[in-house]
Image (cartoon, grey):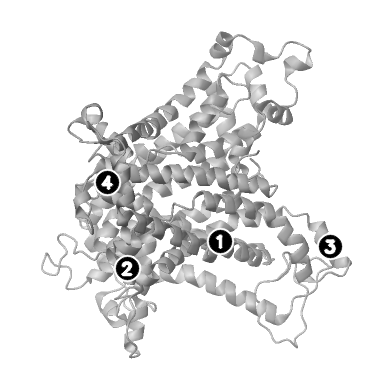
Amino acid sequence: MAAITTQEADSPASARRRRFGPSRKQAAGGPRPANKSLRIRLRRDKSLLLMTVPALLLLLAFNYLPMAGIVIVFEHYDIYQGLIHSQFAGLQNFTELFQSSAFWQAFENTLVISFVQLILYFPIPIMLALLVNTVLSPKIRSFIQAVVYLPHFFSYVLVITLFQEFLGGAGALNVFLNRHGISSWNIMTDPGTFKYLVTAQAVWKEAGWGLIVFLAALAAIDQSLYEAAAVDGAGRWRRMRHITLPGLRGIVVLMLVLRLGNALSVGFEQMLIQRQAVGAQSADVLDTFAYIYGIGGGFGQQASFGADYSFGAAAGLFKAVLSLVLVLGANKLAHAFGEDGLYRK
Amino acid sequence: MSTVTGTVPARRPASAPRRRAKGRPIWEEVPTWYGQFGKGTVLTVVLALVLVPVYAVILTSFSSKASVTAAGGLVLIPHGLSLQNYQLIFSGGTVTQALWVSFIVTVAGTAISMVVSVLCAYGLSRPRSFAQRPLLMTLIITMFFNGGIIPTFLVVNDFKLYGSLWAMILPNAVSVFNILIIRSFFTNTAAELIEAARLDGASEWKVLWSVVIPTSRPVLAVMTMFYAVGYWGTFFNALLYEPDNSKWPLAMVIYEYTYEGNVMPGMGTTGIGGLSNASQFGIQMAVVSLSLVPIVVFTPFVQKHFAKGMLTGAIKG
């Protein structure tokens, strides 16, 4: 989502002045066009507004209607009774949710996996970018980029299947181990190391793609600074310490903010696909919890919750609200560091 | 490891005289051999981590049953290539069907997404247009908050999309993120051209079609690819909304028959033949390859635009 929104948060008038200079009317000393009556502006922009209609309709149908549909968390929603006639439940779904040990397990898993990813995943694109940036030949550079970007475009089903073929019970690693008389280790079904497995999958899929922003930030650093520093006798490490790293500060803070804001989203499809292999105990996270207990028929533990839409929606709402708080909080933090974050102060 | 230095791994002995690499500024020290060697090793390992799995899967899919058996799984060194696996899965049945579904969903979905996104992006890109800020907020709110899986599922059901191919297209047809990127491209480019076209009396539709779209090809190429890749890999919406396996996309088939290892209908060990000369594993790898190959083939063409497409949105705002 990055800093696109900064532009919107900026004062619109000043942003436009910067981009387009004073309008023709203003230059001629006439009244600002904004003062034109609404009707005239509406007629003038009729076709522009018409263009936004399809997108707005789709958003209305698949984003805003579901938001309104959240009221089912206060009901015992029954698909045959519908929204209006379902029985009112008050906060019962939430009390049930907070009493469910499976829910707290999912919450804990979410936080643990998120933390592991922050520590083990986050630095990798930065280090890789520093490394790739030292490659001088444009041909080799763009080859490296083409290769490391590739896994980003594979779906998680594909990524996990590839991992399975290499690290799974019948995968290449274990075939190799067995041939050399070492007992096999099925990483793909080991609940204890699952958090590292999903992190490894995320790194394999996304770390290369993460390079893009850091490479761009590196390219934006004023190259004459390096020359000046070198002339003053700064070696390569000191140049990195005093020029490169400060130059990356802004983008690193932005990426951290994004990561923190998304801390509760830890690879929905990843968890869902591998849930049966490693068990709910370590694979259930907030996202999948809402799905499995709301729609998924509650296979695994606590099957009594099966297809309880309201219960699942309550878990979903809990996550959505907490995520919103995290995004806003992370931005506050970025502002405290004197950075823009997702939007400006 | 300073930021502008370094050639690509040159593994020569330390004593050999080193030429200053082309492109290295004059003030920069020539890198040490062990630094170069270390960098080369790390980069080679990184490349291998991506390329070896892709290579092994594709090679295995083209291998005969004998060589798959000999390798005990993935084939790394080619011996005994054959097209048996592909002949088998293209002879109709689950995979052929899934390929069609994936293809239709990808083409139709990408077309719909692009038309809707480009129109919306342009509609919101002209300075001072009517109600622009409230409309933008309407878009942006959906990036910060959503109803969650269950209400979305119920809404899709209410629209009677359950079990229809549209359920894999419409719920995620609009990416606000992509719209904002396209929009920022539109606002930043061609302002003078647009003004000129408008003075010539061109309507907004005409301006969009003959001025804005032709000047924004790079970002549109990138966005088309983003959407297409998303639809090509569509999995969760299929899991949610497609109970009938004749409407499963490739990703579902991979999940069911390769990852989970269930036996594909009509290709079981006791089912209709082919398996005497093609292994189940080879077939599975052929399915995975079918999903991989379009991505491996198409992304490099758009690659040079990635940074442009991503960064106009992400960094410059």
Left or right for B19, reference A292: right
Q: Nearer the viewer, mark 1 or mark 3?
A: 1
Q: Nearer the viewer, mark 3 or mark 2?
A: 3
Whether residue B233 appears in this view of the structure is no
Question: Which residue in the structure is indicated by mark 4?
Answer: A294
Residue type for callout 4:
Gly
Asked if badge 2 and badge 4 are on a common chain, one would say no
Q: Earlier in the sequence, mark 3 or mark 4?
A: 3
**Callout 3: chain:** A
For mark 2, name the chain: B
Quick one: quadrant of the C terminus of chain B?
Answer: top right
Residue at image mark 2: B61
- Give the quarter of the image for residue B60: bottom left
Taking the spot 70% from the left edge, 14% from the top edge, the residue there is A32
Among numbered discs 4 and 1, the one appearing first in the sequence: 1
Q: Residue at x 25, y 75 (%)?
A: B65
Question: Comparing marks 2 and 1, which lies closer to the viewer?
Answer: 1
Real-space Cα separation, disc 3 to disc 4, in angstroms: 60 Å
Q: Is residue B188 above or below residue B296?
A: above
Frontmost residue, A81 versus A162: A81
Instruction: Say whether mark 2 and mark 3 are on the same chain.
Output: no
Camera-side residue of A225 and B83: A225
